Amino acid sequence: MQLFYEPNFDSSATSISINAMESRHISKVLRKAIGEEIYVTNGLGICAEGILISNHPKECKVEVKTIIEEKKPNFRLHIAIAPTKANDRFEWFLEKATEIGIDEITPLLCDHSERRRIKAERYEKVLQAAMKQSLKYTLPILNPMVSFSDLMEMDVKSKKMIAHCEDEKKEKLSEAANRDNLILIGPEGDFSIDEIKKALKYQFIPISLSEARLRTETAGIVACHTVNLMKSI
């Protein structure tokens, strides 16, 4: 099964016109023929199973036969994380977090951040590719980069947690997480003392991800995997 991404359709669609990028891949790279079976997701939890009725490289068209809705998980995960200096490491996090299961990602600008700008368009493509590869029908939300201070001021309904390396009493994420979670993960130099104090002031719970000191992108994946284990609980 190969999955393609076209955001502009809903569960009532009887036919789908596929965007130029995916159409070129279907017609020129994969050389799909008219009459072949095609699967298309809108990234919002829906997959359309249909038949290719036009294989033009600028706009393929699919006649919808069946609509499949993805089962919603019994938890929600939002990770706010400082992008790494090496861009490929942050893209690796985006890819693997999507494969494992994540709802929302916010690039976080911190006092010790090594990367202060992001490649949002590139990151969206990484997320889309990972969604398709893992045969998921929901595309994670990628928010614009925000400063640590601005994030503190946001009205958040999720359980709020911060993973940091300072020596203090912390809960294990496996025990602290619930059904709706926001987890903060800092840069390689960790959150500053001022940021940790501010997070505690805003009722963020300090958590531990591991006995070892983890790289930023590894910490993000550990957090993602730990929360996903709640699916079986």
Image (spheres, rainbow, N blue to C red):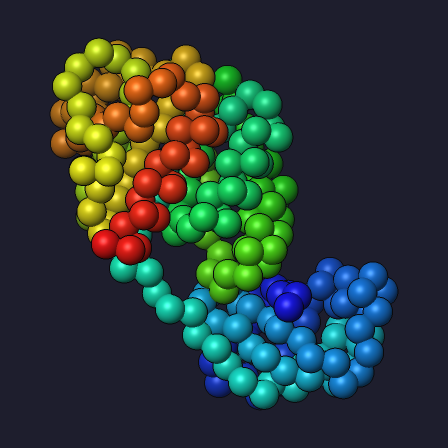
Task: Say if 173 sits above or below 130 in the image.
Answer: above
Task: Say if 149 sits above or below 4 in the image.
Answer: above
Q: Residue at x 17, y 15 (%)?
A: 168
Q: Position of residue 65 (x, y in %)?
A: 58, 88
Q: Position of residue 77 (x, y in %)?
A: 33, 47
Task: Say if 203 sits above or below 11 in the image.
Answer: above
Q: Residue at x 31, y 44 (%)?
A: 227
Is 73 in front, or is 53?
73
Residue 193 sits in quarter = top left
| Image label count | 0
Say if residue 143 shows up in the picture: no
Say if residue 204 shows up in the picture: yes
Horizontal side of residue 10 vs 168, given as left or right:
right
Q: Position of residue 214 (x, y in %)?
A: 41, 21
Horizontal side of residue 178 vs 215, given as left or right:
left
What quarter of the picture does the N terminus occupy?
A: bottom right
Residue 146 sits in quarter = top left
Query: What is the residue that sits farthest to the front in this orientation?
Result: 232
Q: Position of residue 194 (x, y in %)?
A: 25, 14
Q: Residue at x 55, y 61 (%)?
A: 135
Horizontal side of residue 216 vs 9, given as left or right:
left
Q: Residue at x 38, y 42 (%)?
A: 225
What quarter of the picture does the C terminus occupy?
A: bottom left
